[in-house]
């Protein structure tokens, strides 16, 4: 599994609007081949910082989404709320090192 990590720096005071937009556009990766999960977290210490993790089946699925019109709509919807360009990084999941409770 591949995790596409996006680190978002949101314009102060626009956090609620960003979250509303994320609710609207989260279907874009969801409708794409290889999509497995989308997770959003907000920094406790810096509330204008968010991390968005999108889990993909393969690198090819991630690349296909990135080259699709859906990705363009995703970026265009987020852009007005961002203080700077998002940092992105593809990560390979290491299941043998992970632990889940419950």
Image (spheres, rainbow, N blue to C red):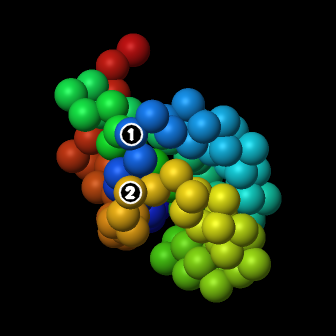
The residue carrying mark 1 is: 12
Q: Residue at x 38, y 57 (%)?
A: 83
Question: From the viewer's perspective, is residue 51 above or below residue 84?
Answer: above
Disc 1 crowd rating (10 Å Cα; few below 14, some 14-19, many 20+) is few
Q: Please state the horizontal and vertical placement of residue 71, each as a whole percent of the image.
A: 65, 71
Question: From the viewer's perspective, is residue 38 above or below residue 73?
Answer: above
* Most distant residue in the bottom direction: 67
Task: Specify whether 7 is left or right of 22.
Answer: left
- State which quadrant residue 61 falls in: bottom right
Q: Please state the horizontal and vertical placement of residue 39, each as a whole percent of the image.
A: 50, 41
Rendered image: mark on residue 81: none
Q: Residue at x 71, y 80 (%)?
A: 68
Q: Residue at x 63, y 44 (%)?
A: 22
The residue carrying mark 2 is: 83
Circle 2 SS class? loop
Q: Which one is earlier in the sequence, the residue at label 2 or at label 1?
A: 1
Rendered-image quadrant of the C terminus: top left
Q: Are marks 2 and 1 in contact (CB under 8 Å)?
A: yes
- State which quadrant residue 34 falls in: bottom right
Circle 1 SS class? loop
Compute the Cα span from label 2 to label 1.
8 Å
Task: Specify whether 97 is left or right of 52.
Answer: left
* Most distant residue in the top direction: 102
């Amino acid at each position: 599994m591949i995790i596409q990590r996006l680190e978002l720096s949101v314009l102060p005071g626009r956090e609620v609007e960003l979250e509303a937009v994320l609710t609207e556009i989260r279907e874009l990766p969801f409708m794409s081949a290889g999509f497995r999960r989308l997770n959003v977290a907000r920094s406790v210490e810096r509330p204008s910082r968010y991390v968005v993790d999108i889990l993909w089946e393969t690198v090819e699925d991630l690349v296909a989404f990135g080259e699709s019109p859906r990705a363009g709509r995703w970026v265009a919807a987020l852009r007005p709320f961002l203080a700077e360009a998002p940092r992105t990084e593809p990560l390979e999941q290491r299941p043998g090192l992970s632990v889940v409770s419950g």
